[in-house]
Image (spheres, rainbow, N blue to C red):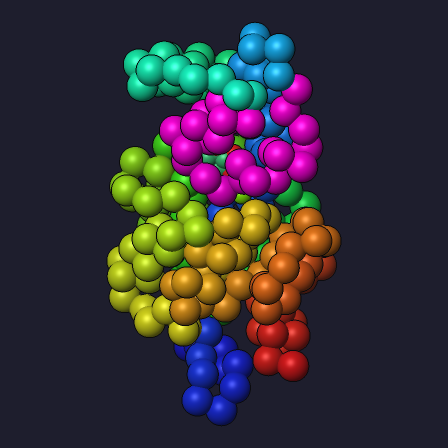
Amino acid sequence: MSLAIMHKMEIKGLIFDLDGVIANTADLHYRAWCKIGDQWGFNLSKAQNEELKGISRKDSILKIANWAGKSFTNEELDAFAFEKNKNYLSYCQTLGIKDILPGVYDFINASMNKDLKLAVGSASKNAKIILQKLGILDLFSIIVDGNMVQNSKPNPEVFIKCAEILELEPKSCIVFEDSQAGIQAAINAGMFSVGVGQEDLERCNHKIKNFEGLSPEQLINQLSN
Ligand code: BG6
Ligand code: MG
């Protein structure tokens, strides 16, 4: 079964970003980047952090070094990225079911009951570890993560790969994203986009504060209006 969205259009698949959409991990990434910035006497602002959301670890360290006016060799940058990840994973140690964002679990289950196909499309190389810690790794048979793509969002590679594995056309997929780079990636992929959490996200087809009380039918109706 699939859910009709317009006369000739059908939504058959849902693709979820991980950090900031499924999991309460976006702040942990920020905390770990701030710790690197602190070493350089650089204060990473919240506004700058918004620009880091959805992009890869390597691209993030490049951006931060640039903002800080620092010039490093590739090896030094890799070492800082490694250190950031070590700190990030230490912050993630206590992650559990309590860190799944509001309504996500029920929304995923309701979507599976409607036979919608589900995937995770994330820039994070830690996606499987995080899903495992949250206790929901088994809910997703398809996970495209930062280890499987060459290009960071807003490049659509991660979402296109999800659709290919789901065997769906991009126009039959909805992407859920909390970052502007991710919304742009969904647009570039030719998919519908739903902005999650951030009020100032631009160009998405629809925005939600979180998944609490939301059903897939309701969302698809709202998208078609
Ligand atoms: C994205 C996050 O999902 O993954 C970014 O929004 C993060 O903040 C990126 O930098 C890469 O994650 P990781 O876990 O591979 O360092
Ligand atoms: Mg995100």
Q: What's the magenta bit mostly, secondary-structure-wise?
A: helix
| Residue positioned 33% across, 15% down in the render | 73
Out of 188 and 159, give the one closest to the viewer: 188
**Up-down relation of residue 138 to residue 187 (above or below):** above
Is any part of residue 204 visible from this angle? Answer: yes
Give the residue displayed 66% in from the left and 61% down from the top.
207
| Residue 208 rendering spot, x and y as whole percentages | 68, 58
Q: Is residue 25 above or below residue 115?
A: above
- State the residue at coordinates (55%, 27%): 67
Residue 72 x, y percent position in the rendering: 39, 15
The residue nearer to you, when weighing 54 against 40, is 40
Please state if 171 lies on the left or on the right of 52 as rendered: left
106 and 27: which one is in front?
27
List the single residue furthest toward the top.
Answer: 39
Q: Please state the extent of the stretch shown in magenta in the rendering.
A: 43-67
Position in image of residue 198 (x %, y %): 68, 49
Q: Quadrant of ligand 2?
A: top right
Residue at image point 32% right, 53% down: 157
